[in-house]
């Protein structure tokens, strides 16, 4: 193989890996990294690349597994993804999916038994969500996603900290709050995928109770933001800014409906509660 061929092959691999996590860079990777840096807290800037790598690799593991469920749905909702875009075959994606599990476990084992345990739990949740169809019903979908995202935060916090044998109490409280908040508001991310979800028979809250789902987001986002600012004793100006932003995002879900509007609202949601939480922890 010539040097040019190697270069083209490398570019193709990078393109595939990027397409797998493209939608989650703003919604998951960046907010979770900020959370980990604030909650640990980050004691050495040299830990930051490790935080990003750990979160990204586990995110990649989940996304590769998730995008094998029904490529036809992705062809409707997210045609840029590697399989519907023709960048990788289902067979090769399956091989990649099961190679990533030991890769994540190996990476975590380099840090501590504690982090290895988190990776094992995440791998189990990924199988439950994807291969065992936990994603098909809204209750299991929301619960598994909330726990999974919180474990991403916990793992990233562990990598960011100086003492990797323990987790700061503040970080544990923040992670517990994340579980509750994500479990009760994360269904707002399902609005934008409603068309594809109906096609495969997935029963999400926006499909089963569309009006109630939007009302719960409109009320829940500012309410949880207010709870966070009270919990972490944030000053009045910052508290008002956080609550106002969350209220605007919640109102947007209610007033602006449709795939494109919901996709934009979802992006704004991804920096509302997560950002207010890591900012609150940092201020605390």
Image: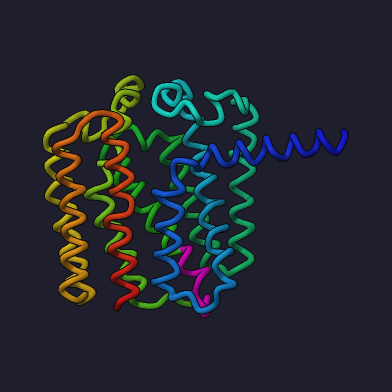
* Viewer-side residue, 144 vs 89: 89
Q: Position of residue 124 (x, y in %)?
A: 47, 48
* Viewer-side residue, 8 vs 48: 8
Q: Position of residue 140 (x, y in %)?
A: 30, 41
Q: Is residue 128 left or right of residue 186?
A: right
Residue at 65%, 30% in the rendered image: 92
Q: Quadrant of the N terminus?
A: top right
Q: Position of residue 235 (x, y in %)?
A: 19, 76
Q: Is residue 213 above or below residue 268?
A: above
* Viewer-side residue, 136 vs 50: 50
Q: Quadrant of the C terminus?
A: bottom left
Q: Which residues are magenta?
A: 155-164
Residue 157 shown in magenta: yes
Residue at 80%, 38% in the rendered image: 6
Q: Is residue 73 left or right of residue 201?
A: right
- Magenta stretch, main secondary structure class: helix
The color scheme shown is rainbow
* Viewer-side residue, 227 vs 99: 227
Residue 58 shown in magenta: no
Q: Is residue 196 above or below residue 170?
A: above
Q: Is residue 72 left or right of residue 186?
A: right
Tally the numbered discs.
Answer: 0
Determine which quarter of the picture holds residue 273. Answer: bottom left
Residue at 33%, 32% in the rendered image: 136
Check the image and name the residue furthest to the right: 2
Q: Is residue 31 above or below residue 97?
A: below
């Amino acid at each position: 193989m010539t040097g040019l061929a190697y270069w083209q092959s490398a570019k193709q691999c990078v393109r595939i890996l990027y397409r797998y996590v493209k939608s989650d860079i703003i919604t998951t990777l960046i907010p979770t990294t900020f959370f980990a840096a604030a909650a640990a807290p980050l004691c050495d800037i040299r830990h930051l690349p490790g935080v990003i790598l750990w979160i990204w690799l586990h995110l990649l593991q989940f996304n590769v597994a998730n995008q094998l469920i029904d490529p036809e749905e992705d062809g409707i909702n997210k045609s840029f993804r590697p399989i519907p875009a023709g960048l990788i075959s289902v067979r090769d994606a399956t091989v990649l999916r099961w190679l990533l599990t030991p890769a994540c476990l190996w990476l975590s084992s380099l840090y501590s038994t504690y982090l290895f345990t988190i990776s094992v739990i995440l791998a189990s949740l990924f199988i439950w969500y994807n291969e065992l169809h936990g994603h098909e019903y809204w209750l299991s979908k929301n619960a598994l996603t909330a726990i999974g995202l919180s474990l991403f935060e916990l793992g990233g916090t562990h990598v960011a900290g100086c003492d990797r044998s323990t987790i700061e109490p503040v970080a544990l409280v923040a992670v517990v709050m994340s579980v509750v908040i994500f479990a009760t508001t994360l269904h707002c991310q399902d609005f934008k995928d409603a068309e594809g979800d109906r096609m495969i028979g997935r029963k999400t809250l926006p499909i089963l109770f569309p009006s109630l789902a939007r009302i719960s987001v409109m009320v829940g986002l500012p309410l949880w933001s207010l709870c966070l600012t009270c919990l972490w004793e944030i000053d009045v100006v910052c508290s008002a800014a956080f609550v106002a932003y969350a209220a605007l995002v919640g109102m947007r879900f209610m007033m602006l409906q449709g795939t494109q509007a919901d996709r934009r609202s979802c992006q704004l949601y991804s920096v509302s509660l997560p950002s207010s939480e890591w900012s609150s922890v940092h201020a605390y």
